[in-house]
Image: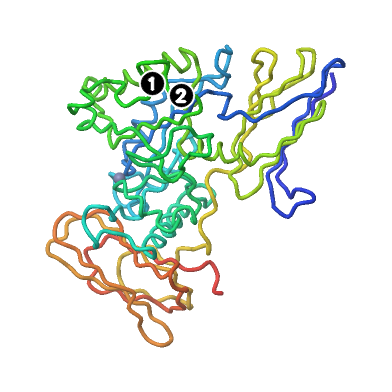
Amino acid sequence: MKKLVIGLLIGLTLGGSVPAAEWIWSWKPAPEDPQPQVEVCPLKYGKKWAYAIEIDDGPKWVRPFAVPFLADYHYTEAPPGVPGGVRRPFIGSVSVIAGSVDNNDANLNGEDLRALIGSGWGVMNHSFDHRANGWSGPSAALNEQQAQEDAFWSQAVLASKLPGGRAPSGAVYANGYTEYNRADALAACGIIIATRVGGSSPRNVTGPATKWMDFTRSYLDEKVWSNEWNKGQPMADFPGADKDGPAVNSLVIDFTHGIERQPDSANQQRWRTRLKTIEDRWGAKGTDELWCGTTAEVAEYARAAQAARVTVTPGKLLVSIPDPVSASALTLRLRGISRQAGVEAPPGGTLHRQGEDLVLTLPRLAPWGVKPPAPRLKRIYDGPAVSVDFPKPEAIAGVTFRLFGNVPSPITYQLAVRTAAGETVIGSRILKSGWVVGGHLFPILPAKPAMLGTGVKVTGAEPLKAMTIWALESIP
Ligand SMILES: [Zn+2]
């Protein structure tokens, strides 16, 4: 048999001005084979529904504990009912407060986040500082500019710490507050799915009614899971648990702030029962109809499936996904390729036969995440929260402060940028006394243009742990 030609190329589509990811797969058709037919499967691996798990607020224990904990449970890469698929572990996504990354040992740091993504987990945007909400009145509400600042800065700061300098494509609303996407602020910064408890979207991810920026999730914090409605039932708030399982093409998201690390605790036992039930009924030990993906990956898949152009001729398949749609690893169903044809799974992909159909999963066609919002930023200072002079003028985009520790008495601190014309105060913040943790943002972008500055003047910020000064990559 002739060596099969399998190629992956990312380039410009001929005849179109939009750059696209393109992928070609070839096989040796049998002489009697008809013109093949192809369709994009609604979900990866030809599965019936998708399962995602979200852990909020970026806690440190996710990497040492939650990763192996979930990896005790499996589905396979094969379509439902087809034996022999490679087993894949359950994974989750961690939603992180951008201003808290690298703050202290209780939070995941940048190295942790890169390792999590490397092991197949997702990282989601959970706002810059988790401050805004819908119940504390005007002081906690976001106006349009503030929503745009939060979206821009949370994405830019996360991108500076994540693989390839790329930003998350999924978000979890801090405090369930959907105004973080006011005036499409999150969507404008690359977010394609945002979740919260009580989100209004149908779970079906293939229909026109899907509300990607308001997707729902099940609330599995201990105090909620054990309350008078849920009664500590392991399958509480799991759709279809008492029937055949979730409806076809749905995305089911479980969410928590914590899984108890004590093995014999009621909470951990309940988690194990829930995950084992999912695995036994619909995972590797059952019908194998679920795909356990990251929340963002499911949304990326649905977008790519809708946007993909697929053409097939005997012996050759061409898949083209236009930018800026994230080029997810699509699964295709091919008809008319007999068992006598010479087919081989593509590198990084999978190939299974389900009845007379071939089910082909492509490798991922693009790197993790999305481009960070423009313009690109660089860090020109990372250190103590003190006044700094630059060796040469820089186009200052904003300044972030990291807080961690005890503030003995209330402080007010102020940030100014030194320019050729003098000092321009960017803002001031008040810190109450007591234990503080989190990030403070003094944005210039995106509401105003970057400021050509020779330094910053910081007053009253001694108790703060650290400061980062962000500038445009080049002076415009
Ligand atoms: Zn949160």
| Residue positioned 41% across, 30% down in the render | 252
Q: Answer with left or right where residue 39 lies relative to residue 27.
A: left
> Which quadrant is the N terminus positioned in?
top right
Q: Amino acid at mark 1?
A: Gly
Q: Nearer the viewer, residue 226 or 74?
A: 226
Looking at the rendering, which quadrant does residue 64 occupy?
top left
Q: Secondary structure at mark 1?
A: loop
Where residue 469 sits in the image (x, y, percent)?
40, 67
Tally of numbered discs: 2
Q: Image point 29% across, 34% down: which residue?
A: 219
Q: Are marks 1 and 2 in contact (CB under 8 Å)?
A: yes
5 relative to 170 in the view: left or right: right
- Residue 197 percent coordinates (x, y): 32, 39
305 relative position to 218: left or right: right
Q: Earlier in the sequence, mark 1 or mark 2?
A: 1
The residue pinned by badge 1 equals 240
The image quarter containing residue 314 is: top right
- What residue sits 40% from the left and 44% below the top? 214
Question: Where residue 18 sits: x, y (%)?
Answer: 70, 53
Residue in view at x 22 percent, y 30 percent: 222
Q: In the rendered image, which residue does mark 2 sit on? A: 247
Quadrant in which ligand 1 is drawn: top left
Camera-nearest residue between 404 and 421: 421
Residue 329: name its quadrant. Answer: top right
Residue 290, labelled with which disc?
A: none
In the rendered view, tell whether residue 121 sits above or below residue 390: above
